Image (cartoon, helix red, strand yellow):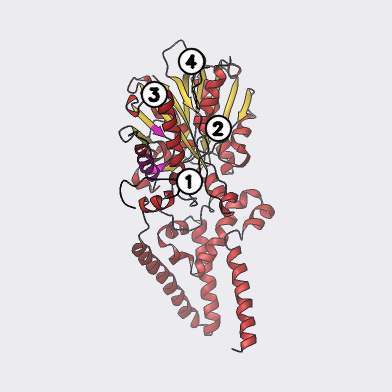
Amino acid sequence: MEYYKKRTLVFANSFVTEGYTVAGPKENDGRYKGFFDFALEDDMFAQNTFERAERKMFEHAIEGAIAKANLNERDIDALIAGDLLNQIVSASFAAKKCHTGFLGIYNACATFAESLLVGSAMLNNGLENVLCAAGSHFSTAERQYRYPLELGVLRSPVTQWTATGVGATVLSNRSDRRVPRVTRGTIGRVIDYGVMDVNNMGAAMAPSACDTLVTFFKDTQTQPSDYDVIYTGDLGKLGSDILMDLTAQEGYDVSEQLHDCGASLYWDEQQTYQGGSGAACSALVFNAVLLGRLRRGEYKKILLAGTGALMSPTTAFQGDSIPAITHLVEVTA
Amino acid sequence: MEANKEITRENYKAYVFEKMPKSSHWKNMLWAFVVGGTICTIGQAFIYLYSLWFNLQDASVLASATLVFIAAMLTGFGVYDVIGRFAGAGSTIPITGFSNAVVSPALEFRAEGYVYGVGAKMFLVAGPVIVNGVTISVIVALLTLLFGG
């Protein structure tokens, strides 16, 4: 595996065989209505708790992705997945039903991009098929990070809305068909600019997104204009604006290419303020939207930068600022 | 912050503060006034109603209990959080807000059972209010005792 002088990796044989998405009802009412493989009518998913519903979404996405790729569970060498709940229970419990090896990972909302990096690296080391998955659920995240659902509170205009959904991707080390490939990637590092406001995660994550993007451009000697689109995970509208300012300062103008999975997930009327957040954002948008556009040739080359805020309610209450991480993958049609 | 000034780790918070959308204080205050005022007017109406049968003190207690009951019902039906989203302090400060603060975690943590869920988490939001309320009342009572009220 070729390795640039810093943190950028090159992948020779990481084919994006198939993607599968399960989305919540609010997400399917959003801008990407009809793009998802399976949309829930009710975010309880016929379970008696929201945690079980999230788990069932993972199980459904794992089975769905394997079936859609015309594979058998035995063909999958490793499942690499994570979610936002404490001890990543949704992914781990869903993995109980799956007999393949399981690597549980957590990098908050950057988990999906992290799983693509880890998966691609493993394909380079001889595995044949890996399944990468990440997701989140509004109601489970809200309870863990914020308030009870029915508590009447005024939301700050910088808040985001945790997306409900799971996206799963099958990566393979060869392909009979012409499919998009994960060609390069940059491993993020943890950056903390001292933002304390847990509502304002876009501002907390933007410096880390800038760091990873600029590192990638420098390491690979590329420019933002070499890409059709650059999708960040869940910076939201404010975070994206900040990112444009920060990268411009480093000499890279991304304003033409930059989109945000979270900010584009909902319509303004859905009152999510800065847009969606959560591990589901990049997993949903990549598998449901970007993959199709790459296959149809609408995009030749894209960047997906998963952004994650790594705080917990405990660290926030204890007065610590919010560290953030951004992992980046380059996907070529 | 003036334009073209370099954004650094040190001035980042100030830069973000300047950039972020602000809550509209006048709009929030207006909604809080309208909704808070409406809740209090309804409370007053109940006091007048109950005064037909009870003395004023009993009528006030009954009116409060009625408001708490209505707020608990609205929380259960998923209406109170919608009101709170724009009313802010207008729906938090009256006694109805306290009802909402107790009922919403009780509903939320019902999934963990009656002991570790409802029992343990019911005062998750209202708990600090009670603790601080009791503490302050004790301090005020002591001061009154010492200096004479």
The answer to which of marks 1 and 4 sits earlier in the sequence is 4
Chain-order first, disc 1 or disc 3? 1
Whole-number angstrom distance, CA of label 3 to CA of label 4: 18 Å
Q: CA distance from mark 2 to mark 4?
A: 29 Å
Left or right of residue A242, residue A69 in this image: right
Range drawn in magenta: A231-246
Subunit of label 1: A
Residue highlighted by disc 1: A193
Q: Residues within 10 Å of mark 1 (few under 14, many from 20)?
A: many
Apparent side of residue A182 relative to residue B27 in the rendered image (left or right): right
Location of residue B88 by image quarter: bottom left
Asked if marks 2 and 4 touch (Cβ < 8 Å), the reply is no
Q: Which of pointers 2 and 3 lies earlier in the amino acid sequence?
A: 2
Where residue A73 sits: x, y (%)?
59, 19
CB within 8 Å, label 1 to label 2: no
Which amino acid lies under the numbered mark 4 shown in the image of this protein? Answer: Ala
Q: Is residue A139 left or right of residue B38?
A: right
Q: Amino acid at mark 1?
A: Tyr
Which amino acid, by three-letter code, is at mark 2? Phe
Q: Identify the subunit bearing mark 3.
A: A
Asked whether the residues under marks 1 and 4 belong to the same chain, the reply is yes
In front of the other: label 2 or label 3?
A: 3
Spot the residue most to the top.
A176
Q: What residue would you read off at disc 2?
A: A58
